[in-house]
Image: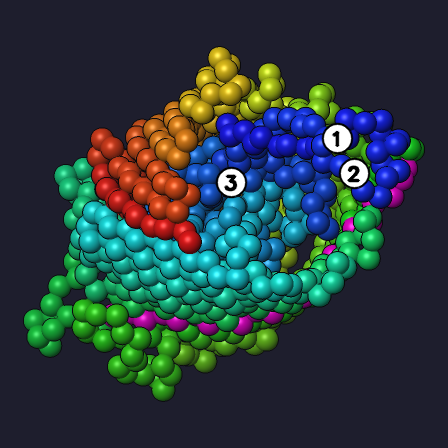
Amino acid sequence: MKYVKLVIVFPFLNFQQAFSQDTISMKSLEEIIIIEKVKQVSEISRLPKIKDTEIFSGKKNEVISIVSSTADLSTNNTRQLFGKVPGLSIWENDGSGIQTGIATRGLSPNRSWEFNVRQNGYDISSEVFGYPEAYYAPPSEALDRIEIVRGAGALQYGPQFGGLLNYVTKKHLGNKPLSLESFQTLGSYGLINSFNAIGGKLKKISYYAYMHHRGADGWRENSSYRTRTGSLSFAYDVSNKWKITGEYSRMNNVSQQSGGLTDTEFRSDARQSHRERNWFSTPWNSGAIQVYFKPNENTNFNLRIFGVIAERNSVGFTRSVNIADTINTIIGSYNSRQLDRDGYQNYGVEFRGIHQYNFLKFKSALSGGVRAYTGKTIRDQQGIGTTGMDYSMKITSQQNGFDFARSLTFETQNMAAFIENMFQVTEKLAITPGVRYEFIRALATGYINTSASGKINDQQRDRNVLLLGIGAEYSTSSTSNIYANYSQGFRPILFSELTPSATTDVIDPNLKDATGYNADLGYRGSLFNNILKFDVGVFRLFYDNRIGTISVDNAPLRTNIGASISQGLESYIEFDATRLLSQKSTLNLSIFGNYSLVDARYVRWENPAIVNDPLLTIEGKRVENAPKHILRSGLTLKYKGFSSTFQYNYVDDIFTDAVNSIDPNVTSTTGKLPAYSLLDLNIACQLKEIYQFRAGINNLTDVVYATRRAGGYPGPGILPGTGRTFYITVGFRL
């Protein structure tokens, strides 16, 4: 804790006499010394009840300060960045850090697709409703903080069951016209990470721009990658009422995909790979212009205009793991690889406002907004690619006159509106009811194969959805409160569920969107002058109308198959041991831990073919990819400019299919994955507030573990997590 000596001078003479004089003699003044504490920025905090145009009262949320974190920023190490956020399950099969795969409450971590993923408040995923996977994540060095609002955030942002994941980037570097920052990292397996940025303030204009490069050979064989990201942002304070901001970000990457392993191969050597010709790339462009208007102290407005133009490209040999990718002796080379391409063109506008007013002698707030969004996905699949080894998106031959065996165009049109009102009923109690309306139109056209029967004729599906929610927050003290929230959510039918995967498949004409709700009840805050920080709560998530495929009259039918309930405990506690002894100590030792208990189970199963088969029915069984117990704990030591964190991670076993198969199948796409424990050590040192040094060891004891199995891309089979790696970073800020 730092202290500032603030010297204020007051007249020693009679105050009325002194202030009535035009000139005050300095001889008549004496010093009054006030010691003021300068608060250290906590690595984890909470959003205020009201922020800008948004209401967070009663909503479970976390804010991760990247500046205060000792995590491995060079590779966007997810388990370290989110180490103090309870209940997050993480897929760790890609050490590149290009994408983030997280989930809460028994949902799937697949590229964070159950979250509404945003950057500085606007959408950055591939397509919010039809294909909500997040292929882009900004480099951690460019971030100021990460905001997470659990499922109860649906009313303000969208219907997603997971809630909001918002990356907030830096806006400028200090208050000088020009400042610089640079971080250079070397690490295991050829890791090179370079981050360089400029920023500053020029009267009413502030700006920030960075260039980032990261590349490595990868821990596994055939897992090399290269990614480059650049961004430019500015803010112009037109007046004390008006502000305009703009930003543009671009990422370009190419990564080699090692593919899956059988369980036997995984146990014998998890670093091995049998796919050296598989490549993946996601060129990404996103940008936004935002206008802020504050006509008075009680009213705020925000207008966002944003867009994403991006691609998803893959080429490789994607057959089952038990089929080798070998040279064809007849043609004297490898067989042709499969080539798949997606193109995304998404645009949207959001207008939000908030007004605070007096109600029952206390200040309440009314927040509302409207949204218009359109997304277009052009999906070309099963093209015949080259027989080579390197990344190439070249088509080598056509199929019945077409470049791709499957070509589909999907469009989404969305109109939405929401309104919430925080009623400050008493000095301590606030109640926030809300409602959100969504109109979604999904259109599909194209063909799923080149035969006459493979054509999709302008399919259209409209829905009108009304979501309700209510939250409450009761202040038990100035630093703690009890919160409760209930919010409905839904997940529209995805593009992959809207069209059959083969001509024999049948789509249920009455196929319904997934619906359900999130509910929270918890107690959070700090006690004993910030010596103890905590957030302990229980939750329940109901997920209805899950979609799957069943057999009817010997034909596959894609329909709604059942429902699941996730319920349990999410807890975070941090204890500052040194502040218990002295409030003035420059040495800080804190002990933290977050633990979650997630009991996610199927409660209804509607497959008539196997509903009475005790071996196949899933009613009462655990939801796949949902660990029951997750514990992340550690020690953080800080002394002046030095800090170090030792983190322990325990993740329980998971099933990878709804039937809860224990033994792996022949292709290792199903089967139980065992629990695992990992240790990480990171240190950071800042000298003279200019120079920075970071170093760390990830997976200190070199544990062999896996968090997922893949049924398709990036290669069927078990996908290992990364073994022990080292890194060292040097940098400066001027």
Considering only vertical position in the picture, is 527 above or below 89? above
Could you give the CA–CA distance between mark 1 and mark 2, rounded to whole angstroms?
A: 8 Å
Looking at the picture, tell me which residue is in the foreground, 470 or 637. 637
Residue at mark 2: 24
Q: Residue 100 carries which label?
A: none
Point out the stretch of residues depicted in magenta. 337-359
Q: Which amino acid does label 3 sit on?
A: Ile
Callout 3: few (<14), some (14-19), or many (20+) C-alpha neighbours within 10 Å? many
Image coords of residue 519 (percent x, y) = 65, 33
Magenta stretch encompasses residue 16: no
- Can residue 720 be seen from the camera position used here? no
Residue at mark 1: 28
Decide which of tag 2 and tag 3 comes sooner along the chain: 2
Q: Which mark is residue 64?
A: 3
Q: Which residue extends farthest bottom?
A: 401
Could you give the CA–CA distance between mark 2 and mark 3, rounded to whole angstroms?
A: 49 Å
Decide which of tag 3 and tag 1 comes sooner along the chain: 1
Drawn side of residue 670 relative to residue 290, left or right: left
- Picture quadrant where residue 79 is located: top left
Could you give the CA–CA distance between mark 3 and mark 1, rounded to whole angstroms?
A: 50 Å
Which SS does the magenta portion mostly show? strand
Q: Which amino acid does label 2 sit on?
A: Ile
- Can residue 69 be seen from the camera position used here? yes
Tell me which residue sits at (23%, 48%) in the image.
187
Callout 1: few (<14), some (14-19), or many (20+) C-alpha neighbours within 10 Å? few
Looking at the picture, tell me which residue is in the foreground, 466 or 82. 82
